[in-house]
């Protein structure tokens, strides 16, 4: 019974790239803003039994948001630090239908503030002139968000919140260049064994 989702989107972006000299490396700063006017947004909602979820069309929604990125690369590209973050305010804009009573509220079950940061170390010519090792550490953060409508008259849907989530991951890639490129990869996710969720009560 779901109708297709349709939207009109506007994006405005700016990028600044600057060389910081022979010893300063390179810096990149990016800032994006966006607006999304959508119809029949497909939203994941909590069922009356508070155990199951189902998808429904929200007649109209408007999203306003910004995201930014910052990256610094050392001379020789030995070391790179990067970070980015996103804030998106996605609100129900329905004037009719089942969800008109919740107009102005955030669409349920969707993160609205999240960020990540990565540090990378590159070691060229490791064990061979045509090989290099790339080791990285990534930290991700997702701010808590509600699985249901937040108004007082919708408390039956607002069963707790998906909590704040902070995870750390380690990766290593050993790459050998030649007629064929061969990569050996090792990834360790969530090394601190944090509790991580996509849906309230269902741990990943």
Image (cartoon, helix red, strand yellow):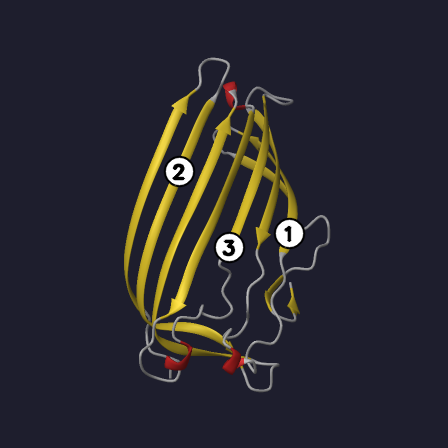
Between discs 1 and 2, the one toward the N terminus: 2
User: Is label 1 or label 3 in front?
Assistant: 3
Distance, label 1 to label 2, CA atoms, is 24 Å
Whether 176 is drawn above or below 55: the answer is: above
Disc 1: which residue? 166
Between discs 3 and 2, the one toward the N terminus: 2
Residue 48 occupies which quadrant of the picture?
Answer: bottom right
Residue ID at (57%, 56%)? 143
Disc 3: which residue? 113
Q: Quadrant of the N terminus?
A: bottom left
Closer to us: 6 or 78: 6
Whether 107 is drawn above or below 179: the answer is: below
Disc 2: which residue? 30
How would you rate the neighbour count of disc 3 (Cα within 10 Å): few for under 14, some for 14-19, many for 20 or more? some
Residue 28 occupies which quadrant of the picture?
Answer: top left
Q: Quadrant of the C terminus?
A: bottom right
Distance, label 3 to label 2, CA atoms, is 18 Å
């Amino acid at each position: 019974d779901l109708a297709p989702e349709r939207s009109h989107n506007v994006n405005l972006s700016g990028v600044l790239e600057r060389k910081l000299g022979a010893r300063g490396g390179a810096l990149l700063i990016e800032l994006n803003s966006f607006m999304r006017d959508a119809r029949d947004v497909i939203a994941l909602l909590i069922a009356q039994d508070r155990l199951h979820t189902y998808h429904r069309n929200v007649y109209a929604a408007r999203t306003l948001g910004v995201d930014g990125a910052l990256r610094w690369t050392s001379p020789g590209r030995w070391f790179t630090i990067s970070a980015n973050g996103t804030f998106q305010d996605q609100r129900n804009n329905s004037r009719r239908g089942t969800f008109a009573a919740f107009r102005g509220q955030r669409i349920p079950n969707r993160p609205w503030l999240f960020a990540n940061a990565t540090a990378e170390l590159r070691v060229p010519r490791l064990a061979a002139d045509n090989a290099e090792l790339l080791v990285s550490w990534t930290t991700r953060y997702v701010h808590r968000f509600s699985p249901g409508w937040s108004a007082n008259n919708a408390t039956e849907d607002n069963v707790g919140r998906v909590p704040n989530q902070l995870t750390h991951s380690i990766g290593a890639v050993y790459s050998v260049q030649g007629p064929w490129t061969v990569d050996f990869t090792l990834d360790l996710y969530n090394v601190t064994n944090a509790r991580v969720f996509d849906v309230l009560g269902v741990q990943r």
